[in-house]
Image (tube, helix red, strand yellow):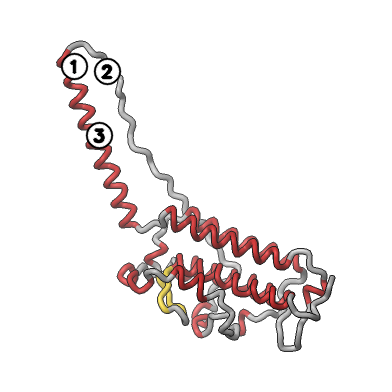
């Protein structure tokens, strides 16, 4: 787990915090009647003038809408698609890694100081709830800081490459260490799914400027709220790899 000193700052954030994403519908441009009775050359000329004015008005409206989108900083379609893809991909890999495990396999530990699959999964699920809470209840409710956008630019690829890399190990903070919070694997998976669904739905629907709400990460320094969502998915990928390591142990139960 990469998170360290920053975790103390968010202890007031509820583990199961989730907010309902804002839905803002876009109003279509007003439609204009094109049907005109052609009675004379003068009327035809009038139609041409009207069409010209209409085209100019629509071009101006489109430019204004584009400018407004840029100013409000709502996520682009490409940004939404990439985050949703990564969130869904890492969810799929995690769920596949724990699917069909027996109780013995679920709780197997290769050594007393090593985590079992159950413990790694608990850490993933708990971190998911915590990071969702950080993004939605802390970062997005903090004052926007668009002047810091230059400090976060281009960190998406770094997050998705560096965080899953387990060549560098780290200790999880005490509050995110497994303690058997979930009685069964099914309950843990259900809560993980709910947390991940909340994150995906938020990315798909929010009209808030996630890029302007920025919060420091101990490793990558300043990250915006969108990047923190990618960080959450990358963290899941990191520990899904850890589950694979547990299952690759030669003493891992056959069933």
Of labels 2 and 1, earlier in sequence is 2
| Residue 181: quadrant of the picture | bottom right
Q: Name the residue at 38% across, 71% down.
A: 152
Of labels 3 and 2, earlier in sequence is 2
**Where does the image place residue 228, in percent across and percent down from the top left?**
48, 69
| Residue 33: quadrant of the picture | top left
Q: How many residues crowd around disc 1 within 10 Å: few (fewer than 14), some, or many (20 or more)?
A: few
Whether the residues at callouts 2 and 1 have beta carbons within 8 Å, the answer is yes
Q: CA distance from mark 3 to mark 2?
A: 17 Å
Assign the C terminus to one quadrant of the image: bottom right
Badge 1 marks a residue whose secondary structure is helix
Q: Name the residue at 28% across, 52% down.
A: 67
Badge 3 marks a residue whose secondary structure is helix
User: Above or below — where is 43 with respect to 223?
Assistant: above
In the shown orientation, is residue 81 left or right of residue 241?
left
Pick the residue in front: 166 or 130: 166
- The residue identified by callout 1 is 43
Q: Name the residue at 76% across, 82% down.
A: 109
Pick the residue in front: 231 or 177: 231
Q: CA distance from mark 2 to mark 1?
A: 9 Å
Whether the residues at callouts 3 and 2 have beta carbons within 8 Å, the answer is no
- The residue identified by callout 2 is 36
- Outermost residue, top side: 39
- The residue identified by callout 3 is 55
**Where does the image place residue 12, in percent across and percent down from the top left?**
53, 76
Whether the residues at callouts 3 and 1 have beta carbons within 8 Å, the answer is no
In the shown orientation, is residue 22 left or right of residue 34?
right
């Amino acid at each position: 787990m990469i998170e360290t000193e920053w975790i103390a700052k968010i202890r007031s954030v509820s583990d199961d915090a989730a907010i309902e994403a804002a839905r803002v519908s876009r109003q279509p441009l007003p439609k204009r009647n094109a049907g005109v009775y052609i009675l004379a050359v003068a009327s035809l000329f009038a139609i041409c003038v009207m069409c010209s004015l209409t085209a100019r008005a629509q071009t101006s409206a489109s430019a204004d809408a584009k400018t407004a989108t840029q100013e409000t900083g709502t996520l682009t379609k490409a940004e939404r698609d990439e985050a949703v893809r990564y969130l869904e991909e890492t969810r799929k890999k995690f769920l596949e890694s724990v699917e069909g495990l027996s109780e013995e396999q679920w709780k197997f530990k290769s050594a007393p100081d090593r985590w079992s699959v159950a413990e790694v999964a608990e850490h993933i699920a708990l971190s998911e709830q915590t990071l969702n809470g950080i993004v939605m209840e802390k970062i997005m409710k903090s004052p926007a800081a668009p002047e810091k956008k230059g400090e976060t630019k281009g960190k998406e690829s770094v997050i998705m490459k560096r965080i899953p890399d387990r060549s560098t190990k780290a200790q999880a903070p005490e509050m995110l260490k497994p303690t058997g919070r979930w009685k069964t694997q099914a309950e843990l998976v259900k809560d993980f799914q709910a947390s991940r669904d909340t994150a995906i739905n938020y990315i798909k629907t929010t009209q808030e400027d996630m890029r302007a709400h920025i919060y420091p990460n101990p490793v990558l320094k300043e990250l915006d709220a969108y990047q923190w969502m990618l960080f959450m998915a990358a963290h899941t990928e990191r520990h899904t790899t850890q589950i694979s390591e547990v299952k690759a142990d030669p003493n891992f139960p056959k069933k």
